[in-house]
Image (cartoon, rainbow, N blue to C red):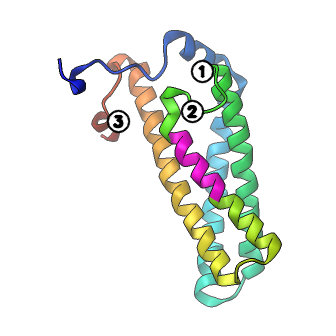
Amino acid sequence: MGLGDRPARPLYTQAERRRRDGSPWTLVQGLLAPLQFAIFLVSLILVLRALATGHGLLAAQVSVVVKTLALYAIMVTGSIWEKAVFGRWLFAPAFFWEDVVSMLVLALHTAYLAALATGALSEQALLVLALAAYATYVVNAGQFLLKLRAARLEGAGTGQPHFAEALS
């Protein structure tokens, strides 16, 4: 049996699935994720407008701060959810790579706040940093959407889907 032939661990054991379904943090995550995405879309438009026209810089900056606060909220509650479901605050095997990329997303958003507070970057450089943070956020959101799809397929009794199945 080759390395690729071994059976994949299901995303959730039955006990983890019960804890996930019974946790209030699952609902919190389900509400915060689309809210954060909506904030991201508005902020992205404001940041792009400020970069393109030079107008609306303050609105763009405020929107990035609001987006960062929403990110902090979802990261803190997400780590509480991960502890409730998997028994670890972060880097549970089922969400290891999502958490790794989340750390990069957090680092870039936090760097934005630090640069904004200290004046370490020019206005344009700040906006570019926000776009870099947003690009990593999009990658991370995609990771979580794929994981959500895999969990739904698994929950429907199709077993642990392979990555290609989760994409379809």
Tell me, for residue 1, which label it has, or none: none
116 w.r.t. 8: above or below: below
What kind of residue is marked 2?
Phe
Quadrant housing residue 32: top right
- Quickly name the residue at label 2: 91
Tell me, for residue 86, which label it has, or none: 1
Tell me, for residue 166, which label it has, or none: 3
Q: Determine the CA span between mark 3 and mark 2.
A: 21 Å
What kind of residue is marked 3?
Ala
Quadrant housing residue 87: top right
- In magenta, the rendered stretch is 98-107
Q: Determine the CA span between mark 3 and mark 1.
A: 22 Å
State the residue in front, 50 or 106: 106
Please state the horizontal and vertical placement of residue 23, each as a whole percent of the image.
Answer: 68, 21
State the residue in front, 106 or 143: 106
Residue placed at 43% from the left, 34% from the top?
149
Residue placed at 63% from the left, 28% from the top?
82
Q: Which callout, 3 or 1, points to the residue nearer the camera?
A: 1
Is residue 44 toward the left or the right of residue 93 in the image?
right
Residue at disc 3, secondary structure: helix
Residue placed at 57% from the left, 69% from the top?
131
Specify which label sits upstream in the sequence, 3 or 2: 2
14 w.r.t. 43: above or below: above
What kind of residue is marked 1?
Phe
Please state the horizontal and vertical placement of residue 33, each as a whole percent of the image.
Answer: 62, 44
